[in-house]
Amino acid sequence: LLGLRLGADREAVRWPVGMDRAGAGHAGAVDVAWQDNRDSDYDVYLQRVRPDATLAPGWPAGGLRPLPSLSGFQLHPHLAPDGEQGVYLSINNLTSFYQVHTQHVTGTGALAPGWPDFGQPASSIETDEDESQITADGFGGAIVVWKDFRNQKDDLYATRLMPLGPTATLLSLVSAEAEPGRVRLTWHVATGAVSEAQVERQLEGKAWREVAVLRPDASG
């Protein structure tokens, strides 16, 4: 057995680091992602291989470059099927800092509608993001999780990818603490997204009722 050489049309150093079963309708096929330096910088390439060790129709022999307009060093790709013959991709992209980027590719080896050729960043915060992982959510999307240094310590953050791109969240709960006679809520709000928040309470067997209206006052 000699095996199948991926990206065989060009000489390069290749590091295969991502692999997953292909989506529905491609029984036995696998999607393989790797980083290589055929164009000096490291870029990520993606290929679909059928059970007979041939390439799936429509996929280029040298591998598909899913993020052709993304500058920097594209590293550590991970894959998750979208349930519709396509695949989601997450990578760590290195410029002056690490940032997680995502992409969605169809079963024909083309970028999914609504996804630009530089992909989508998992977060709009400019801070080091590393060690991303991705998994299918079972509903046509995927969940990406990564290690994030925005608070000067390693935290875990996640976002959900949908067929047309990451789901934007204007407000997300950070923590909820309950004590006798007191509840403390902490949340993160996108800049300028929310001017006030309504807090409601429900007792067992009762309807929801408003207990407060909160407005940001920069006091933290």
Image: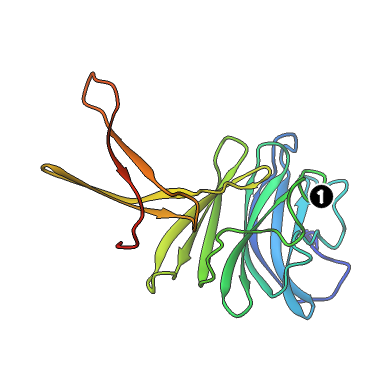
Relative to residue 105, is residue 99 depicted above or below? below
Q: Considering depth in this image, is 20 or 166 the residue closer to the camera?
A: 166
Q: Amino acid at mark 1?
A: Ala
Q: Residue 189: which quarter of the image?
A: bottom left
Label 1: state its secondary structure.
loop
Q: Residue at x 81, y 50 (%)?
A: 109
Q: Residue at label 1?
A: 110
List the single residue furthest toward the left. Answer: 180
State left or right for residue 174 relative to residue 97. left
Relative to residue 17, is residue 111 depicted above or below? above
Q: Considering depth in this image, is 216 or 128 the residue closer to the camera?
A: 216
Q: In the image, residue 220 lies at what x, y percent?
A: 30, 61
Q: Residue 61: which quarter of the image?
A: bottom right
Q: In the image, residue 130 lies at what x, y percent?
A: 52, 68
Q: Considering depth in this image, is 24 or 117 the residue closer to the camera?
A: 117
Q: In the image, residue 174 lies at what x, y percent?
A: 35, 53
